[in-house]
Image (tube, rainbow, N blue to C red):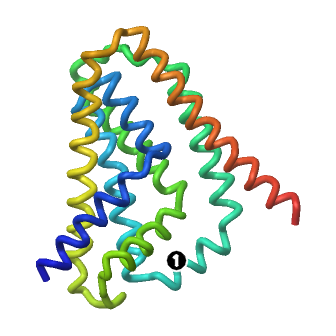
Amino acid sequence: MLIEFLKCFLIGICASAPLGPVAIFVMQKSLSDGHKAGFLTGLGATFTDTLWATIAMFALTVAEDFIFANETVILIGGGAILLGMGISMAFKDPFRRLKEDKEGGFWLKDTARTVLLGLSNPGAIAIMLALFAFFGVQVEKNDLSVAPCILAVSAGSVVYWFNFSWLFGHLRRSFKMGTLQWINRISGIIVSVIGLVLLIEGLVRLFGR
């Protein structure tokens, strides 16, 4: 059981590692607002990673059918979310200061944004399935004993985002304000482009039928 737990822990780290819109968003928050803000933002990715791992284990067939049937809607919705978030990142002042009594709500909003960002990429379930196969994790979809494995995936994701946000939260001291502003804008542009591509692909599929 310990071996399976360690495998799932590594799966949680590997599933979080690819540099995509979520990582760019967490990096931007860590550089502009520090380690704590970046880590809390990254917890949104942990939630979606755990969700995809749970679906992969308990409801694989249903999940595949749902994703296939709603692929166009998911592309359009996910692309719109990414595009809006990218534009917001590109034009938002990364050095704004919030009042002390509003800080919690601010970070909660960023965590929620990351959850939406993760949910807009249901292809992440394919990554989970590939990682389960690569590490040779054997579980029964309807067996409640897989709960420790799901927790291990979540723990691996938490550890990854903690260290990721810590690194960029401390690197912010090495950047000048102007540099951080450009990183903020470039990050937003990258996310916007990814969202625009997904949105166009979804619209082409919708109107090309």
Q: Is residue 25 above or below residue 180?
A: below
Give amino acid for label 1: Ala
- The residue to which callout 1 is attached is 63
| Percent position of residue 160, x then y | 26, 50
Judging depth in this view, the residue of 140 and 164 nearest the camera is 164
Q: Is residue 43 above or below residue 190?
A: below
Residue at point 48% right, 63% down? Answer: 124
Q: Quadrant of residue 181?
A: top left
The quarter of the image holding the C terminus is bottom right
Q: Is residue 37 above or below residue 155?
A: above
Q: Residue furthest right?
A: 208
| Percent position of residue 108, x then y | 32, 39
Please state if 136 lies on the left or on the right of 18 as rendered: left
Please state if 145 lies on the left or on the right of 83 as rendered: left
| Percent position of residue 195, x then y | 63, 43
Judging depth in this view, the residue of 135 and 26 nearest the camera is 135
Q: Quadrant of residue 142?
A: bottom left
Residue at point 22% right, 25% down? Answer: 170
